Image (tube, grey):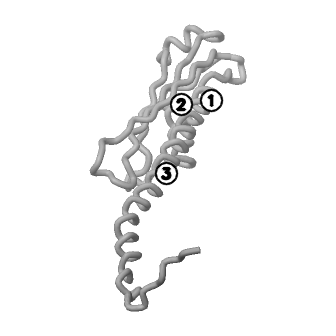
Amino acid sequence: MWRPRMNSNVKLGSEKGTTIVETAMMLPILVLLIFGIIEFSLIMYDKAMITNASREACRYGIVFHADVDGNYTPLTDAEITARANAYLQTFLISFRAGGVNAVTTVTPDYATRQAGGSGTPMTVTVLYEYDNLVLPQIGDSLTLGAETVMRME
C-alpha cells in the first residue's frame, strides 16, 4: 500500500495563529446569538407577566364589593390600575431607571360599572413598552400588551 511520505522540512509552526483568527471571527457571532436568546427569553417572560397583571387587575375589579349594608360599590379605575402596576412592579423584569411604566385601561368606566352591576363585562388592557436590552440602538421599543375580559360578580 502506498502512503505519502511526510516531508520533514515543513514546519508546523506556520498554522500557529489560525486558532486565534478563527476565534476572533466567530466570537462576535456567538456572543450576538447568546444575547439574542437572552433578549427573546426576557420578552417572553415579560409578556407572560403582563398577561398575569391584566388578569389580576381584572379579577380584582370584578369581585363584588359591598359595604355592611349590602350596597354595591365597584372599585375605581385608579384602584384597578394600581393593582396591575403593583403586580408589574413586583414581577416584571425591567432595566429602566424609572421602573415600570405600563399603561392600564379599564372599560367600561366607573359609572357604567356601578349602574350595570352583576353580569356587566369588564375589560382590562395593559400595555408596556419594552426597550431592547442587548442592542437598544438597532430597533425601536417593542409594545407588549394583554387584554382580559371578565363579567362582574
The residue singled out by tag 2 in the image is 80
Name which residue lies at 55% across and 31% down: 54
Q: Answer with mark 2 or mark 3, whichever residue precedes in sequence.
A: 3
Expressed as whole percent of the image width and height from the top left, the position of residue 87 reads 56, 42
Q: Report the quarter where the C terminus lies.
A: top right
Query: Is the residue under label 2 in contact with that under label 1 (CB below 8 Å)?
Result: yes
**Picture coordinates of residue 69, whole percent (x, y):** 71, 19
Q: Are marks 3 and 1 in contact (CB under 8 Å)?
A: no
Q: Mark 3 sits on what residue?
A: 37
Residue lying at the far left of the rendered structure: 137
For badge 1, the amino acid type reads Tyr
The answer to which of marks 1 and 2 sits earlier in the sequence is 1
Q: Nearer the viewer, residue 138 or 32?
A: 32
Q: Quadrant of the N terminus?
A: bottom right
Q: Nearer the viewer, mark 3 or mark 1?
A: 3
- The residue tagged 1 is 60
Q: Secondary structure at mark 2?
A: helix
Q: Residues within 10 Å of mark 2 (few under 14, many from 20)?
A: many
Residue 20, quarter of picture: bottom left
Secondary structure found at label 3: helix
Residue in view at x 44 percent, y 55 percent? 33
In the depicted view, which residue is nearer to us: 121 or 30? 30
Residue 9 sits above or below residue 39 on the image: below
147 horizontally vs 14: left or right: right
Q: Which mark is residue 146?
A: none
